[in-house]
Image (spheres, rainbow, N blue to C red):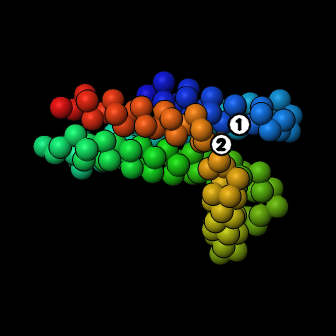
């Protein structure tokens, strides 16, 4: 669990440093966001992987782990990104729990998810993808 989060954070860090991105503080923030996303997503990804691969062949176990871990990691990290994005823009939003606030919340959240899909997913490559292959192989071998 911690190892998965560390690798996801390292993947983002490597991509950002190689791209000579922004300031060191912003690099630390994005790295921590990806690490936290990985830490939370790993156990959430194992649950459907175990369910989908129960009493199945090794190839099915590998595929279940690959898809479940990838989906959980991307979704949880995108969710954390969207919450941070929403927190930044909250200053300019209407009073909490009003009708316009819900509309602003939904649109801000949707914009954050879109921005993560366009800019954030690439931070999982190549290190995160390699870790996904290794973790899926480990899962398939361990469950046999």
Q: Position of residue 10 (x, y in %)?
A: 63, 28
Q: Residue at x 70, y 74 (%)?
A: 100
Q: Is residue 131 visible?
A: yes
Q: Quadrant of residue 95?
A: bottom right
**Image check: 93 left or right of 118?**
right
Q: Residue at x 66, y 36 (%)?
A: 12
Q: Secondary structure at mark 1?
A: helix
Do residues under tags 2 and 1 come within 8 Å of each other at their CB atoms? yes
| Nearer to us in this view, 85 or 113 | 113
Q: Position of residue 134 (x, y in %)?
A: 42, 31
The disc label shown at residue 123, or none: 2
Q: Which residue is mark 1?
A: 15
Q: Quadrant of residue 6?
A: top right
**Image check: 53 left or right of 90?**
left
Q: Residue at x 63, y 57 (%)?
A: 117
Q: Quadrant of residue 21?
A: top right
Of the numbered discs 2 and 1, the one sitting upstream in the chain is 1
Q: Residue at x 52, y 40 (%)?
A: 129
Q: Is residue 36 visible?
A: no
The disc label shown at residue 140, or none: none
Q: Position of residue 19 (x, y in %)?
A: 80, 38
């Amino acid at each position: 669990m911690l190892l998965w989060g560390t690798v996801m954070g390292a993947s983002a860090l490597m991509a950002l440093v190689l791209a000579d991105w922004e300031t060191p503080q912003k690099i630390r923030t994005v790295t921590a966001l990806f690490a936290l996303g990985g830490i939370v997503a790993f156990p959430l990804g194992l649950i459907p992987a175990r369910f989908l691969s129960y009493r199945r062949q090794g190839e099915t176990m590998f595929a279940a782990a690959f898809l479940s871990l990838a989906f959980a990691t991307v979704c949880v990290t995108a969710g954390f990104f969207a919450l941070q994005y929403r927190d930044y823009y909250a200053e300019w939003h209407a009073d909490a729990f009003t009708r316009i606030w819900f509309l602003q919340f939904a649109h801000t959240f949707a914009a954050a998810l879109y921005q993560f899909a366009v800019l954030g997913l690439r931070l999982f490559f190549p290190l995160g993808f390699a870790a996904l292959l290794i973790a899926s192989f480990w899962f398939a071998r361990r469950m046999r």
